[in-house]
């Protein structure tokens, strides 16, 4: 049973819509058939049968942020000729740029308006339907505030969401049934691939590949969630000996593992391992090493236990 007016359930849905994405979600459901009524049209109005093969593209475009509620398929039937066309609204600058760029590259006809353009008249638009060579339908004329109110009657929140949006019209440059417009629309409104996780900066501790973190890892190398190994598993402490090419050396005096060209991990160890020196000379060398700061391990990775 089809009601001669908008059902209470559908009117409640449309009244609850507050933003352009909200309206786009409902419009997508209308294209798919799960919402029966579209504001501004007679009760039970459904997409034209010629659009049956393109409703999925139109629904997807609406969910992406391009509120498209007017469309027609291409046709060449005797004296009647139609261009494939779609007219809608968008506010997302990234989506708008992508729509325009992809449409231009595909060779589509494009008209851009806002509601202020209607103050100077509707403009020429693009003839999308002819009968016996005479224009009978035009897409792309500028819509003023009164036009938008007529599209969304008794839905002030919808009018507030749609009025400031950019009006975008895309049409096939040629008459007849062609897939150019629909392929282009599908490409332009396809969901953007997820941004790759940062590979250098760990978002939790901010360590990088160049600035090794305190737990001994090499920062974010190939982690999908953008964290370093130590932040993913706090129990992880990387064995630095696996991260360098040279084999580690053990201090001849204290046995500490380090990386360097000496037999000792620090100058202090080297001095302490000189038993033949008199005590006063050994003390002088130790004092000199302390003044120059040369008492730390040769490697920053291993502390001397001596």
Image (tube, grey):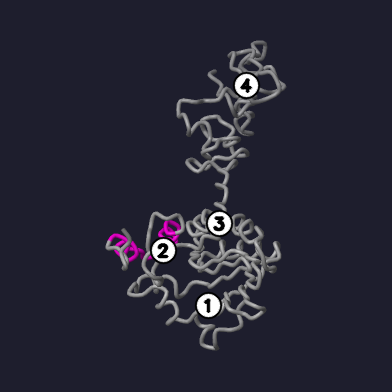
Quarter of the image with the N terminus is: bottom left
- Reply above or below: 30 against 114: above
**Total labels drawn:** 4
Q: Check if mark 2's residue and mark 1's residue have beta carbons within 8 Å.
A: no
The residue at which mark 4 appears reads as: 241
| Residue 280, visible in the rendered structure | no
Please provide percent x and percent y for residue 18. Answer: 36, 65
Mark 4–mark 1 distance (CA, rounded to whole Å): 65 Å
Q: Check if mark 3's residue and mark 1's residue have beta carbons within 8 Å.
A: no
Quadrant of res 209: top right
Give 64 or 72, whichever is nearer the viewer: 72
The residue at which mark 3 appears reads as: 54
Quarter of the image with the C terminus is: top right
Residue at 52 percent across and 77 percent down: it is: 114
Residue at 50 percent across and 79 percent down: it is: 143
Give 67 or 269, whichever is nearer the viewer: 67
For marks 3 and 4, the one nearer the N-term is: 3
Quadrant of res 274: top right
Please provide percent x and percent y for residue 141. Answer: 56, 79
The residue at which mark 2 appears reads as: 23
Q: Check if mark 2's residue and mark 3's residue have beta carbons within 8 Å.
A: no
Tell me the crowding category of disc 1: few under 14, some 14 to 19, or many 20 or more residues within 10 angstroms, Cα based.
some
């Amino acid at each position: 049973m089809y009601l001669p007016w908008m059902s209470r359930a559908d009117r409640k849905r449309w009244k609850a819509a507050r933003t352009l994405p909200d309206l786009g979600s409902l419009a997508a459901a209308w294209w798919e058939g799960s919402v029966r009524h579209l504001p501004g049209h007679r009760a039970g109005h459904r997409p034209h049968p010629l659009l049956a093969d393109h409703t999925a593209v139109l629904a997807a475009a609406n969910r992406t942020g391009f509120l498209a509620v007017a469309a027609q398929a291409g046709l060449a039937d005797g004296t009647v000729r139609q261009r494939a066309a779609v007219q809608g609204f968008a506010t997302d600058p990234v989506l708008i740029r992508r729509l325009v760029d992809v449409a231009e590259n595909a060779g589509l006809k494009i008209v851009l308006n806002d509601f202020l353009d209607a103050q100077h008249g509707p403009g020429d638009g693009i003839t999308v339907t002819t009968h016996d060579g005479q224009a009978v339908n035009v897409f792309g004329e500028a819509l003023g505030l009164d036009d938008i109110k007529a599209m969304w009657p008794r839905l002030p929140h919808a009018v507030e969401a749609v009025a400031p949006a950019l009006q975008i019209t895309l049409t096939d440059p040629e008459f007849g049934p062609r897939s150019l417009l629909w392929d282009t629309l599908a490409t332009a409104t396809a969901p953007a691939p997820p941004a790759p996780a940062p590979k250098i900066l760990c978002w939790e501790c901010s360590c990088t590949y160049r600035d090794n973190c305190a737990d001994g890892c090499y920062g974010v190398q190939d982690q999908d969630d953008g964290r370093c190994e130590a932040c993913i598993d706090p129990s992880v402490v990387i064995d630095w000996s696996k991260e360098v090419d040279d084999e580690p050396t053990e201090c001849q005096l204290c046995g500490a593992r380090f990386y360097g060209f000496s037999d000792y991990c620090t100058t202090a160890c080297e001095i302490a391992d000189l038993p033949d020196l008199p005590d006063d000379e050994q003390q002088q060398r130790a004092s000199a090493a302390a003044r120059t700061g040369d008492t730390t391990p040769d490697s920053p990775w291993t502390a001397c236990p001596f």
